[in-house]
Image (cartoon, rainbow, N blue to C red):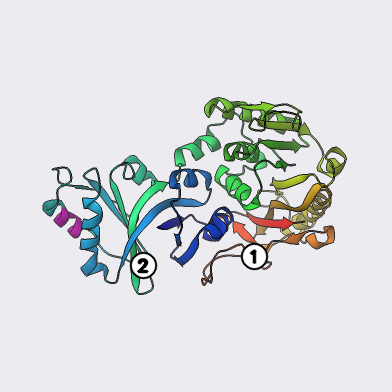
Amino acid sequence: MKYFFVLGNHPELSLAEIYSILGNQAKYLSFAHGILIVEAENLDVQNLINGLGGTIKIGQVLGQIKNIATESKAALAEMLQAAEKPLFGVSLYGAKYNFLPLALTLKKELKINDRAPRFVVSREPVLSSVVVEQNKLTKGGLEAVFIKDGSIYWYGKTLAVQPFKDLSARDYGRPSRDDASGMLPPKLARLMINLAGADKQELLIDPFCGSGTILSEALLAGFTKIWGSDISQKAIGDAQNNLAWLKRHYNLDFASDSAIETHGNASLQNVQLKICDVTKLSSVIKPNSIGAVVTEPYLGPQQAGKLEPKEAAKNLSNLYSETLKQLARILKPGGRIVMAWPVFILRKAVYLNITPENFGLRQVQNLLPGNFKYNDLQFTPRQTLLYGRQGQRVWREIVILEK
């Protein structure tokens, strides 16, 4: 079966995440206009999209056409006749075409369960996940999707959209937030966890846990042993509050105590929180014992004028180098570190000056699937991934390292 993945605002990150989850289970057929087409055996798309941080929609590919003006009517009629409810919308990626006249014609010509179909109108050429969800187009209705790919168009129907309400609740609905320290978005935290590619029975740690975003997403992802630390007592208190909220909100069953490795029930999730300076980490955790580290350390001054970018990068390079020195000691051979490093944007981008190889770590290569042309995607000079938006002075460089 063929599927399409509509990627988010950082398609390079989304592609890397999908590849880390599906790996060789899928055949990667096409990438165009922020849409990935794959062939795979019966994906559980709802469970899959709930676990992805960087994918907006997943749908089933039903066929191809060559001419959107002359062939889209038959393709759309085919999909409409298979729908359960008389409600549909259309999204077109990579091209322009006014589907309204065609939709009005189909309303007159077709009946779905003896009712004329109703067309969901949008000002944009594509329907947002909010519009799709609010109109229940994946619950018996239809969002028909057309994707331009060179001289052909793929077409199909959306099966699931990103759970934006849940993501918003985990971002803004938690009891403890610290905007002054910078907040890692839950979807980026989930994406970073997925990039770690770790066994969920392995111990995953976040040594800069802050208010617990990565810990929360790791719990929801199904990791059974999680360890978080921070030098700030307030941060640990915030993390405790947020984990208690998560437990109530999602009806989770996990223990928050120090007995990470002593529970007999392997299915019981355990979280340990500890006040700890990252420079002392290897004296607290056994060497060669950690399967995955996912973390965002201090990103430096977020406001203009607080510190000159080159000076900030120099200061943070020392902190991050000491952090990598500690992490390399406790990481298992083959273990993976996924970190967010700051990139200071002013007249030009200023990156941290760090050499992971000095600590026995190597940068993971070949993050993206297939042999597609990725000329339009955004990478750093060292071919790592970027996360940020226009107007931000501090972006995130997503770095993936292995021991």
Q: Where does residue 369 sit, x and y in percent of width and height? A: 55, 64
Report how far apart the C-alphas of labels 1 and 2 lie in the structure: 28 Å
In this figure, which residue is indicated by the disc labeled 2?
Answer: 148
Q: Quadrant of the C terminus?
A: bottom right
Q: Is residue 154 magenta?
A: no
Secondary element under disc 1, as helix, strand or loop, is loop
Q: Is residue 39 visible?
A: yes
Circle 2 packing at 10 Å, graded few (<14), some (14-19), many (20+), is: many
Q: Is residue 13 visible?
A: no
Three-letter amino acid code of the residue under disc 2: Lys
Q: Which residues are magenta?
A: 100-106
Task: Please report the residue visible at 71 percent of the width from the left and 28 percent of the height from the top.
Answer: 264
Q: Is residue 395 left or right of residue 401?
A: left
**Picture quadrant of residue 233:** top right
In the image, is residue 80 above or below residue 93? above
Q: Is residue 43 left or right of residue 270?
A: left
**Picture quadrant of residue 286:** top right
In this figure, which residue is indicated by the disc labeled 1?
Answer: 380
Secondary element under disc 2, as helix, strand or loop, is strand
Q: Is residue 69 left or right of residue 269?
A: left
Out of 290 and 377, give the one closest to the viewer. 290
